[in-house]
């Protein structure tokens, strides 16, 4: 039985996507992630709860949001240019259901990231998009990391299978092997990130070791198609040794393709909006020559490599 009333926290739904899986896809972004990658481009997906994003360029300094907060979690301050801004105290903020601060802002400077949705609501969107899937398209669960809300994610996948919809999941697969088996039964394609092959270094970069991730990849690859994705972060994981080890691991597990994803700064502004600190502001995106060099290393080991 599918629990269509099961609720989860979603921060975006994108229709008609040509990425993140074959064909035309509907991508559902679920909040919550067990990793805290230094370069995360979707920091609004890390916290499993609703969050307020502050757009200071729209703020008219009325300060009504401060007056409306029952927990005194909002205060005024000044930025580096001397402009009055507001700041949220994450320790005091209790993610109110009513979000009085948002309602008090008439200038649209405060926006909510995260919406509670049921499986039924998600499936209605998917069914609307179904005519565009044709033979190759389908749905992709992304995030954050959709396995963080694994009960909600699994119900969505079950409902998709009832409609014979192709299912893809984007994840680091940092979760219990017993839950991984449930995903294997309901997922047609796995897009799995490997941030670094050295477990200690992986923990430095993401907050968690990689042992469980590699174990789960080995299990999944015996049962379903897997594409490995490696974000290329200059100076952090782009050395030849790490790239070679990633390719060798993929070859040993009969994984045929690695996507290498060049680091970018497109999500950096979100950190300020969320009151978070971006920890690698001085790192620049890798050059095309560097990406081609990495591609050559991977393909020399016998793995198809795609940039992007």
Image (cartoon, rainbow, N blue to C red):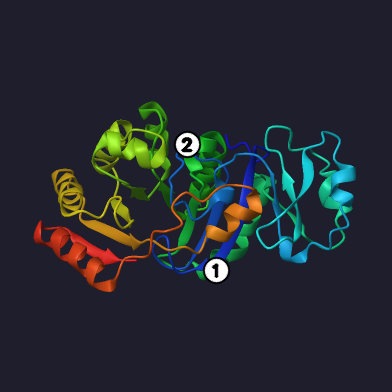
* Residue at x 24%, y 38% (from the top left corner): 198
Q: Nearer the viewer, residue 235 or 41?
A: 235
User: Where is the N terminus found, in terms of image quarters?
Assistant: top right
Res. 85 in view: yes
Name the residue carrying label 2: 34
Residue that carries the numbered disc 1 in the rendered image: 131
Residue 78: quarter of image: bottom right
In-image side of 174 versus 291 (left or right): right
The Cα atoms of the two marked residues, 1 and 2, are separated by: 35 Å
| Label 1 vs 2, first from the N-terminus | 2
Of 93 and 145, which appears nearest the observer?
A: 93
Q: Label 1's element?
A: helix
Q: Residues within 10 Å of mark 1 (few under 14, many from 20)?
A: few
User: How many numbered callouts?
Assistant: 2
Query: Residue extending furthest bottom?
Result: 288
In this rendering, is residue 18 above or below 140?
A: below
Tag 2, which secondary structure? loop
Callout 2 crowding tier (Cα within 10 Å): few <14, some 14–19, many ≥20: some
Residue positioned 37% across, 50% down in the render: 188
226 lies left or right of 84: left
Tell me the number on the disc at residue 270. Answer: none
Towards the viewer: 245 or 4: 245
Quarter of the picture containing the C terminus is bottom left
Q: What residue lies at 24% left-to-right and 42% top-to-bottom?
A: 197
**Left or right: residue 254 compared with residue 172:** left
């Amino acid at each position: 039985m599918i629990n269509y009333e099961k609720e989860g926290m979603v921060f975006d739904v994108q229709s008609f996507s040509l990425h993140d899986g074959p064909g035309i896809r509907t991508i559902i972004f679920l909040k919550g992630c067990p990793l805290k990658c230094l370069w995360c481009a979707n920091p609004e997906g890390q916290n499993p709860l609703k969050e307020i994003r502050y757009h200071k360029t729209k703020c008219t300094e009325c300060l009504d949001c401060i007056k409306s907060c029952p927990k005194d979690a909002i205060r005024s301050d000044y930025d580096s240019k001397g402009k009055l801004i507001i700041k949220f105290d994450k320790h005091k903020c209790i993610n109110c259901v009513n979000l009085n601060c948002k309602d008090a802002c008439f200038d649209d400077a405060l926006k909510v990231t995260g919406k509670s949705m049921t499986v039924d609501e998600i499936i209605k969107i998917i069914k609307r998009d179904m005519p565009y899937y044709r033979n190759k398209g389908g749905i992709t669960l992304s995030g954050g990391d959709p396995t963080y809300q694994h009960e909600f994610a699994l119900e969505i996948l079950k409902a998709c299978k009832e409609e014979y919809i192709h299912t893809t999941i984007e994840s680091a697969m940092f979760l219990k092997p017993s839950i991984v088996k449930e995903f294997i039964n309901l997922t047609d394609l796995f897009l799995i990130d490997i941030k670094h092959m050295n477990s200690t270094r992986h923990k430095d970069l993401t907050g968690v070791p990689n042992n469980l991730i590699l174990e789960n990849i080995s299990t999944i690859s015996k049962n379903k198609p897997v594409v490995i994705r490696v974000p290329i972060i200059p100076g952090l994981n782009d050395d030849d040794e790490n790239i070679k080890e990633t390719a060798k691991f993929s070859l040993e597990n009969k994984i045929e393709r690695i996507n290498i994803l060049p680091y970018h700064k497109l999500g950096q502004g979100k950190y300020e909006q969320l009151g978070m600190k971006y920890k690698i502001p001085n790192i620049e995106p890798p050059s095309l020559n560097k990406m081609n060099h990495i591609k050559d290393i991977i393909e020399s080991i016998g793995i198809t490599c795609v940039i992007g």
